[in-house]
């Protein structure tokens, strides 16, 4: 009994010891992050965004979905901060509730495309040769399209809806993560400790998921953050074209499209949702740029 | 004026970095005359390159000259305008660097880069400079027509360094600064390049500052030698004097650590490590490693004084008070 | 590359045929009598087994035949030939704007690093990437056309301007070639806004890469040599640094072309631009299968071509790459 516990404690200490440089690295990253203005501003914006999305039902002043014809096409006022649209719906409320939709899309798309891409990348990098070739060719095929066009094609084929938007964007976005994970996996595969573990008898899947995968997470997470802005823009684009989230759901892109025919006299219908999109994407881009600067090996030392 | 060509007085240079302020030069004193050859010796990081860049006026952010001055031919460089400094560079003072292939612009042909120097030196258009280019390349021992049309990555280290020498000497500068010109080259090529330099400089009458950590090369080439440690010149004398009668404890240590043919004694290193320039030792920066250190050494940096005729050293062992204490 | 294109066509086919959606229903409306539906299906070849349809499709492609558009009843290839030049023209103008703006901003940012110029241009370019293209287009249209009236509205030409005789299909080029100056001026006025909108979003990535590349180059040894030679700051930057720094930027221009193609989709919709982007959007909305497949395939082809050209240009510019 006792000998097993001692053995386990030794393994644990070893486990942590090997992770220590990574932990030190993360501490250093955190320090740099706090001192990079760009990243901090971005983080603030995103935190605001997430908070609004989470507390939306509480802070929203009006019902975003039901129409109220007596109050239609009102310009911005204290009553209706962003004005009302052609159905009398308060745009401010719609924008706030819309943030939930956007957050949901980002979350799911990141999960799916990140997960799928990383998985395929690790498999490709780890097994190499034939498997690698196939997966890489498939990646190339997907990459031959400008991503919006491909997403549009998928969305159109599947039919406009929230779920399909998520699927369409995920399908188009996984390639980046696959490439990244593959590069990392190939590097890690060559490390001596992998050989050691294999010699002790660990199976392939165990090695892949327990040892290779965690090391890939860092660059993948960074890349996910960098892509979140793009995800929103793609979703909004699809919404705008009518290929995405269907009305009356207040997705920001489709809201901009709603206001198109009223652009001249009732400019607020299209303008405010667009500002919301720009604001959030800006936050992600600031954060992403800041992270990119931090990650630049020449600036760290 | 100590030297009629160059006089560096109490030069202090710092670099502002995220780690802190690096006090790279701590009051460097250096001088030389026309046509003299001065060797600047010291370990990596002692400030040799920074000194040479200061002489060229090439210290820029995050570095700054915070005090002291460089007098070139009697004129203060701190007081010179940007145009005057510019004018000096490439014409009166030239420099060659350590890794010749990467010191050349990879997307330009050699001929063009040499022509650039010549056009500046002779104040002619680059196109008109080509005959001169061929002449200079021949002078440094290269096949001129062929080399002129090549790109830097197509040259060997030795050839590239010859090309750099051609560029630097094309204006017949009063002072040539050679920053470790042979450190990146094979030993046999080293000898060739140093011979070439010797010949050309003798012909054209340029003064040379040779920066190197190789004492053998310095001994062969230079008339005078200045030894630097952690941002100061600690000893300056003729080559003969330095090797036969080193005064500063650091110089002594250096010489003991260099193997000599016929020597049967063990190599002796200097105890301790090179100091951190963000938090350097107080007073004389060598005192933590010095076997002769006294109290005074940790208080104030000793001035560079003439202990013997033509032989300067910065050490309290050789000042009045120092001698008194050491005895 | 051939393999990739093959795979691309497979994907396109897969999307359009295997994923559930009913083109016939879209064409005829939900209440069409079954015989009509069947007749339509037969006409479109949709009643054949999937393998046969795929076979037909691939054969068609090999012969340069992309099928007949369900909406316009013309061969898709003809449709593409009609609409693509307008998109090409827009893309070219946008590239010119984005490269000019982006490179300048990038250089300024690098040379005056961390000054207000740097911060301003970084924010300016990040804004370009963050604002949704369709929104920027709408707002600018609102401001410059509806409110200020400085620039004309949607479309390639105003209503009463006579278009030039069609030679290449590119309006401005044809105007010049046929000497139709009124059309040229009008066309130019119409292209400014969409090109600016499209170009602005690409500016940011170009500025960023230029800045990074320039910073990289300025750090290198040969810049120190150039300064030691006494060359003036301006000469050092323009003659020595720029050539080296622009190499990765050129790569980016190729990629930018690709992203411009997708931005074009949205921009053309807003500005009523008669280009390939708008064509595909309309095709998607009515589920015009052949048009969708043909158009998407064509775009993928252009995209791949752009990347290929970039690879070749890289070799030309960097002597170290030539073997």
Image (spheres, rainbow, N blue to C red):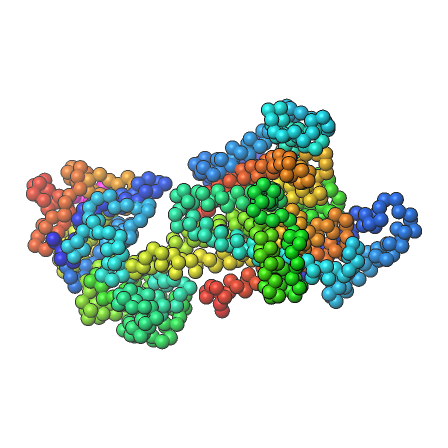
Which residue shows up at 82% across the image and 49% down it? C27
Asked where in the image residue A57 lies, by quadrant, the reply is: top right
A27 is within the stretch colored magenta: no
- The picture places residue B51, in percent across and down from the top left corner, at 24, 52
Asked where in the image residue A273 lies, by quadrant, the reply is: top right
- The picture places residue A239, in percent across and down from the top left corner, at 68, 41
Q: Is residue C321 above or below residue C194?
A: below
Which residue shows up at 53% across the image and 58% down it? C251
B292 is within the stretch colored magenta: yes
Characterize the magenta stretch by its predominant secondary structure: loop
Q: In this image, B257 relative to C125: left or right?
A: left
Q: In this image, C46 relative to C274: left or right?
A: right
Q: Is residue B167 visible?
A: no
Q: Nearer the viewer, residue B320 or B179?
A: B179
Q: Is residue C267 above or below residue B196?
A: above
Which residue shows up at 27% across the image and 73% down it? B139
Span shown in magenta: B288-293
- The picture places residue A298, in percent across and down from the top left corner, at 42, 48
- The picture places residue C247, in percent across and down from the top left corner, at 48, 59
Q: In this image, A208 relative to B198: left or right?
A: right
Q: On the rendered image, what quadrant is the N terminus of chain C found in?
A: bottom right
Which residue shows up at 70% across the image and 39% down it? A245
Q: Nearer the viewer, residue B92 or B105?
A: B92
């Amino acid at each position: 009994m006792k000998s097993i516990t001692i053995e386990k404690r030794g393994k644990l200490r070893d486990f942590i010891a090997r992770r220590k440089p990574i932990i030190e690295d993360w501490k250093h990253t955190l320090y740099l992050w706090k001192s990079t203005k760009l990243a901090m501003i971005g983080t603030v914006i995103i935190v605001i965004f997430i908070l609004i999305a989470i507390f939306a039902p509480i802070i929203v002043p009006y019902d975003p979905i039901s129409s109220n014809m007596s109050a239609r096409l009102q310009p911005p006022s204290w009553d209706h901060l962003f004005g009302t649209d052609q159905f009398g719906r308060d745009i401010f409320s719609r924008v706030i509730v819309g943030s939930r939709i956007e957050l949901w899309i980002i979350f799911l798309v990141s999960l799916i495309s990140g997960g799928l891409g990383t998985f395929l990348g690790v498999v490709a990098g780890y097994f190499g040769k034939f498997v690698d070739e196939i997966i890489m060719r498939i990646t190339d095929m997907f990459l031959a399209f400008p991503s919006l066009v491909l997403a549009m094609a998928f969305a159109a084929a599947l039919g406009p809806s929230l779920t399909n938007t998520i699927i369409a964007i995920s399908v188009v976005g996984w390639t980046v993560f696959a490439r990244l994970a593959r590069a990392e996996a190939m590097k890690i595969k060559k490390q001596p400790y992998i050989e050691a573990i294999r010699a002790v008898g660990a199976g392939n899947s165990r090695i892949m998921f327990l040892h290779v995968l965690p090391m890939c997470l860092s660059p993948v997470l960074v890349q996910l953050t960098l892509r979140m802005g793009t995800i929103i823009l793609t979703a909004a684009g699809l919404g705008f074209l009518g290929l995405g989230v269907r009305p009356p759901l207040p997705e920001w892109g489709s809201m901009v499209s709603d206001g198109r025919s009223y652009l001249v006299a009732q400019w607020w219908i299209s303008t405010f949702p667009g500002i919301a999109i720009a604001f959030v994407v800006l936050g992600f881009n600031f954060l992403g740029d800041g992270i990119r600067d931090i990650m630049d090996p020449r600036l760290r030392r | 004026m100590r030297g009629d060509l160059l006089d560096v007085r109490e030069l202090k240079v710092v670099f502002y970095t995220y780690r802190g302020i690096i006090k790279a030069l701590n009051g460097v004193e250096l001088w030389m005359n026309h046509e003299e050859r001065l060797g600047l010796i010291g370990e990596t990081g002692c400030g040799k390159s920074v000194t040479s860049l200061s002489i060229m006026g090439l210290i820029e952010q995050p570095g700054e000259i915070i005090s002291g001055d460089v007098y070139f031919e009697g004129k203060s460089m701190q007081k010179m305008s940007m145009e005057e400094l510019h004018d000096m560079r490439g014409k009166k003072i030239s420099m060659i660097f350590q890794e010749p292939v990467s010191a050349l612009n990879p997307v330009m042909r050699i001929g063009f880069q040499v022509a650039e120097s010549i056009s500046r030196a002779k104040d002619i258009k680059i196109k008109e400079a080509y005959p001169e280019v061929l002449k200079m390349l021949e002078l440094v021992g290269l096949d001129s027509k062929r080399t002129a049309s090549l790109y830097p990555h197509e040259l060997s280290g030795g050839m590239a360094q010859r090309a750099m020498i051609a560029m630097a000497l094309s204006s017949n500068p009063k002072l040539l600064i050679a920053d470790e010109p042979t450190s990146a080259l094979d030993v046999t090529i080293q000898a060739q390049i140093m011979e070439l330099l010797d010949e050309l400089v003798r012909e054209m009458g340029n003064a040379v500052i040779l920066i190197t950590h190789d004492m053998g090369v310095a001994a062969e080439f230079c008339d005078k030698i200045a030894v630097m440690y952690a941002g100061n010149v600690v000893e300056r004398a003729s080559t003969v004097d330095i090797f036969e009668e080193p005064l500063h404890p650091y110089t002594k240590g250096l010489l003991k650590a260099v193997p000599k043919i016929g020597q049967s004694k063990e190599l002796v290193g200097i105890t301790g490590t090179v100091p951190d320039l963000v938090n350097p030792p107080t007073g004389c920066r060598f005192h933590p490693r010095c076997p002769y250190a006294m109290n005074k050494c940790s208080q104030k940096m000793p001035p560079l004084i003439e202990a013997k005729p033509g032989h300067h050293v910065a050490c309290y062992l050789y000042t009045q008070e120092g001698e008194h204490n050491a005895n | 590359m051939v393999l990739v294109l093959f795979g691309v066509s497979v994907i396109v086919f897969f999307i359009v045929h295997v994923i559930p959606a009913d083109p016939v229903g879209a064409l005829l409306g939900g209440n069409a009598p079954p015989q009509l539906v069947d007749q339509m299906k037969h006409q479109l070849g949709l009643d054949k087994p999937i393998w046969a349809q795929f076979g037909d499709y691939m054969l068609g492609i090999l012969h340069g035949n992309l099928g007949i558009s369900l909406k316009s009843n013309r061969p898709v290839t003809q449709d593409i030939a009609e609409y693509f030049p307008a998109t090409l023209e827009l893309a070219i103008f946008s590239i010119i704007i984005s490269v000019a703006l982006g490179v300048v901003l990038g250089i300024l940012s690098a040379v005056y690093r961390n000054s207000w110029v740097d911060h301003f241009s970084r924010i300016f370019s990040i804004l370009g990437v963050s604002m949704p293209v369709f929104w920027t287009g709408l707002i600018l249209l609102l401001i410059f056309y509806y409110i200020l009236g400085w620039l004309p509205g949607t479309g390639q030409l105003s209503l009463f301007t006579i278009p030039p005789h069609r030679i290449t299909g590119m309006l401005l080029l044809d105007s010049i070639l046929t000497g139709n100056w009124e059309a040229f001026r009008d066309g130019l006025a119409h292209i400014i806004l969409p090109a600016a909108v499209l170009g602005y979003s690409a500016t940011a990535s170009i500025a960023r890469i230029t800045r990074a590349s320039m910073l990289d180059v300025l750090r290198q040894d040969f810049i120190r040599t150039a300064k030691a030679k006494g060359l003036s700051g301006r000469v050092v930057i323009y003659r020595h640094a720029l050539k080296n720094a622009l190499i990765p930027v050129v790569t980016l221009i190729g990629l930018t072309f690709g992203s411009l193609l997708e931005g074009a989709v949205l921009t053309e919709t807003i500005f009523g631009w008669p280009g390939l982007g708008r064509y595909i959007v309309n095709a998607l909305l009515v589920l015009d299968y052949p048009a969708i497949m043909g158009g998407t395939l064509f775009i993928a082809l252009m995209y791949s071509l752009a990347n290929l050209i970039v690879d070749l240009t890289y070799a030309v510019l960097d002597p170290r790459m030539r073997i």
